[in-house]
């Protein structure tokens, strides 16, 4: 994917580029900040530097094999978002899982949509990927709103499939046919 620059709705220049091994420390701080904030993501425990190094290495290896794309959104030197798509294995190699998140202060500015589009365009350019899927908290109206605008449709819902701080949320499953 080509590096892209654009201006957020607040006029900040945001760069979207492929994740690098040198991003490890920034990614570690980023994910742990999201965990502390308790946003609607599944992760709820801090990641260690060793775990993050292993994760970033695995991302690089899978990107080399064109199995995945991991994109970061940067405001200057600050990592403010991340999105990825990764092919599954075995009899699921024609489908790929998708994820996205933004740092607090960078949401609702159109960045999520641009970031998701770059990642989904990559999936569409890979005809061996036929569908992209995701799971989302049923209470996450903003994320579900974005996914619907991108063409995702719900294909299932597990009532109370997520438990966070004693509260339940439905686990919603959505997919996008990337061949059409
Ligand atoms: C979910 C998230 C990635 C969305 O990115 P974002 O940059 O905040 O969203 P955008 O500003 O690009 O808005 C995307 C679209 O969703 C729509 N939207 C926003 N809030 C909405 C709401 N409450 N209900 C319905 N639609 C909504 C907007 O209208 C927008 O469409 P537009 O571009 O035509 O205006 C971001 O808010 C985030 O990181 N949240 C915390 C982590 C998270 O929840 N990740 C998803 C886990 S599954």
Image (cartoon, rainbow, N blue to C red):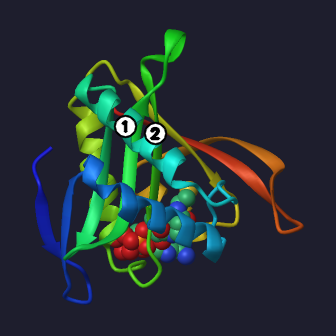
For the residue carrying disc 1, how many other residues have a C-alpha within 10 Å: few (<14), some (14-19), or many (20+)? some
- Name the residue carrying label 2: 54
Q: Position of residue 18 (x, y in %)?
A: 22, 49
SS label for mark 2: helix
Residue in front for this viewpoint, 159 or 28: 28
- Quadrant of residue 96 within the rendered picture: top left
Q: Is residue 99 left or right of residue 161?
A: left
Residue extending farthest right: 166
- Going 44% across and 74% down the picture, which residue do you hit? 103
- Going 19% across and 88% down the picture, which residue do you hit? 11
For the residue carrying disc 2, how many other residues have a C-alpha within 10 Å: few (<14), some (14-19), or many (20+)? few
Which mark is drawn over residue 40? none
Which mark is drawn over residue 57? 1
Residue in front for this viewpoint, 60 or 74: 60
Residue 31: tell me if it is visible. yes
Residue in front for this viewpoint, 179 or 110: 110
Q: Does mark 2 have its CB less than 8 Å from ligand 1?
A: no
Q: Position of residue 48 (x, y in %)?
A: 57, 54
């Amino acid at each position: 994917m080509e590096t892209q620059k654009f201006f957020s709705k607040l006029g900040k220049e945001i760069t979207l580029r492929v994740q690098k091994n040198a991003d490890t420390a920034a990614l570690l701080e980023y994910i742990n900040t999201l965990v502390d904030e308790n946003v609607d993501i599944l992760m709820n425990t801090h990641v260690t530097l060793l775990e993050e190094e292993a994760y970033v290495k695995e991302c690089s290896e899978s990107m080399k094999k064109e199995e995945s794309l991991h994109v970061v959104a940067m405001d200057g030197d600050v990592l403010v978002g991340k999105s990825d798509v990764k092919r599954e294995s075995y009899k699921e190699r024609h489908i790929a899982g998708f994820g996205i998140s933004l740092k607090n202060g960078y949401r609702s500015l159109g960045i999520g949509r641009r970031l998701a589009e770059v990642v989904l365009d990559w999936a569409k350019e890979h005809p061996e990927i036929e569908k992209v899927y995701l799971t989302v908290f049923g209470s996450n109206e903003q994320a579900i709103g974005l996914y619907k605008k991108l063409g995702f449709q719900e294909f299932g819902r597990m009532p109370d499939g997520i438990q966070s701080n004693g509260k339940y949320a439905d686990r919603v499953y959505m997919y996008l046919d990337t061949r059409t």
